[in-house]
């Protein structure tokens, strides 16, 4: 495993590279309630609209759709079994703000540590520009 740059959240978190995947470890006294996995979707806006229609976003975990320091976007929902699921998008600048209306920068809620701007939810090879 390789330690990766990590945004600063309200609880201690470290991101690790495990082959072609990331593992995010966080310290939380109620950890089982917050265990989740992240998925990248092909059409964040369509997914966002459908999630709102179904009413399954999880405002208890994240009341906003957060924009991370690297420009990625995270949204959380609960599936029918109650599992927490993170939905990820690589670039906030490609989203229509008239569709996705409740974006909020993580940095507006949590002061970012130096180096947080280098964190990315999406692994890139050395040949792939950021």
Image (cartoon, rainbow, N blue to C red):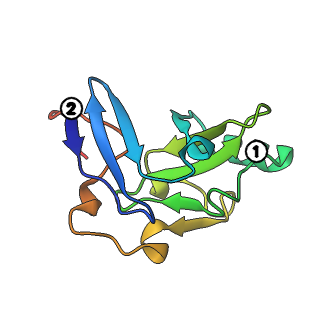
Pointer 2 local density, CA inside 10 Å: few below 14, some 14–19, many at least 20? few
Residue nearest the viewer, comparing 2 with 71: 2
Residue at image x 55%, y 68%? 104
Residue at image x 65%, y 65%? 102
Q: Which mark is residue 125?
A: 2
Pointer 1 local density, CA inside 10 Å: few below 14, some 14–19, many at least 20? some
Residue at image x 46%, y 58%? 93
Secondary element type, mark 1: helix
62 vs 112: above or below: above
Residue nearest the viewer, comparing 46 with 54: 54
Q: Which residue is mark 1?
A: 51
**Side (left or right) of 36 relative to 100:** left
x and y percentages locating residue 37 in the rendered image: 53, 34
> Farthest residue toward the top?
19
16 vs 66: above or below: above
Query: Could you say which quadrant of the image residue 103 lies in?
Result: bottom right
Q: Which mark is residue 15?
A: none
Query: Could you say which quadrant of the image residue 69 lies in?
Result: bottom left
Camera sees residue 95: yes
**Side (left or right) of 94 relative to 96:** left
**Side (left or right) of 73 relative to 85:** left
């Amino acid at each position: 495993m390789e330690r990766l740059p990590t945004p600063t959240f309200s609880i201690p978190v470290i991101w690790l590279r495990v082959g072609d995947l990331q593992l995010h470890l966080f310290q939380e006294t109620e950890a089982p309630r917050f265990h989740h996995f992240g998925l990248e979707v092909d059409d964040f806006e369509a997914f966002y609209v459908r999630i709102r229609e179904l009413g399954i976003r999880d405002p208890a975990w994240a009341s906003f759709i957060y924009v991370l320091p690297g420009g990625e976007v995270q949204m959380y929902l609960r599936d029918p079994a109650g599992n927490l699921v993170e939905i990820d998008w690589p670039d906030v600048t490609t989203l229509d703000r008239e569709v996705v209306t409740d974006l909020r920068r993580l940095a507006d809620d949590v002061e970012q540590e130096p180096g947080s701007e280098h964190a990315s939810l999406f692994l890139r090879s050395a040949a792939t520009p950021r």
